[in-house]
Image (cartoon, rainbow, N blue to C red):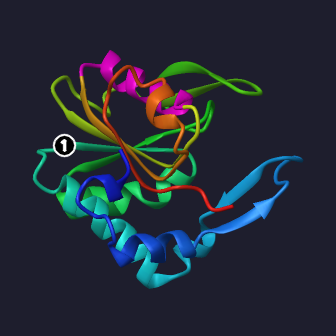
Amino acid sequence: MFAAENGLKGDPRLKGISDSITVVPHFPKPGIMFQDITTLLSNPKAFKDTIDIFVDRYRDMDISVVAGIEARGFMFAPTIALAIGAKFIPLRKPGKLPGEVISEAYELEYGKDRLEMHVGAVQRGDRALVIDDLVATGGTLSAATRLLERVGAEVVECACVIGLPEVKGRCRLGGRPLYMLVEPRQ
């Protein structure tokens, strides 16, 4: 669900967040309208509003783990985790974490990839929130939730700053809740 459908309709913060995202046409390849969040991150008000909306939503949900997906999920997840009193867990691309890891493969529109996390980073019974910057098909978020659930965590919700409107009905999250702040800019 989009934030505007969940009590934030008309909230000027959402417009400020959306307006602070830059669209880069044909990046990284022709036909892609890349949603560049670096301009959101460099806008202190928009960045704070983004974090505040997520913190307000998750503050009282008894979340014990905030898992951020590499790389742009790392921009939001640690701050949210600190604000709600949870631990931050990075979900990384293969070969980026030292030590023993567990991994989960997933399909992309253009190939395959994997997410990894440290063994023991998440405990059975942890209540997890998964954060990324954008959801298109839900493949990466689905891999993240499978990875966390394999070690016994309960994935309470997945959240993204940007969500494609058509993803609501066709996302690969198997009924898990998905919270998105804004739609992509054109």
Name the spot of residue 121 as percent of width and height, x first.
32, 34
Label 1, on which residue? Answer: 64
Q: Is residue 71 left or right of residue 86?
A: right
Q: Is residue 100 visible?
A: no
Please tell me whether residue 29 is drawn above or below residue 155 in the rendered image: below
Camera-nearest residue between 117 and 44: 44
**Residue 45 magenta-drawn?**
no
Quadrant of the drawing holding the C terminus: bottom right
Please tell me whether residue 10 is drawn above or below residue 65 in the rendered image: below
Q: Give the residues in magenta.
A: 138-152
When asked about the image quadrant of residue 70, the answer is: top right
Name the spot of residue 99 as percent of width and height, x first.
48, 30
Query: Badge 1, how many Cα within 10 Å: few under 14, some, many 20+?
Result: many
Q: Residue at x 75, y 54 (%)?
A: 33
Please tell me whether residue 145 is drawn above or below residue 34 in the rendered image: above
**Residue 139 magenta-drawn?**
yes
Q: Is residue 133 left or right of residue 186?
A: left
Name the spot of residue 30 as percent of width and height, x first.
89, 47
Q: Residue at x 35, y 26 (%)?
A: 148
Camera-nearest residue between 37 and 164: 164
Element at label 1: loop
Three-letter residue code for mark 1? Ser
Quadrant of the drawing holding the N terminus: top left
Name the spot of residue 32 as percent of width and height, x first.
79, 48
Q: Residue at x 33, y 56 (%)?
A: 3
Please tell me whether residue 28 is drawn above or below residue 127 in the rendered image: below
When asked about the image quadrant of residue 9, the answer is: bottom left
Q: Residue at x 26, y 53 (%)?
A: 6
Q: Is residue 44 visible?
A: yes
Q: Main secondary structure of the magenta part?
A: helix
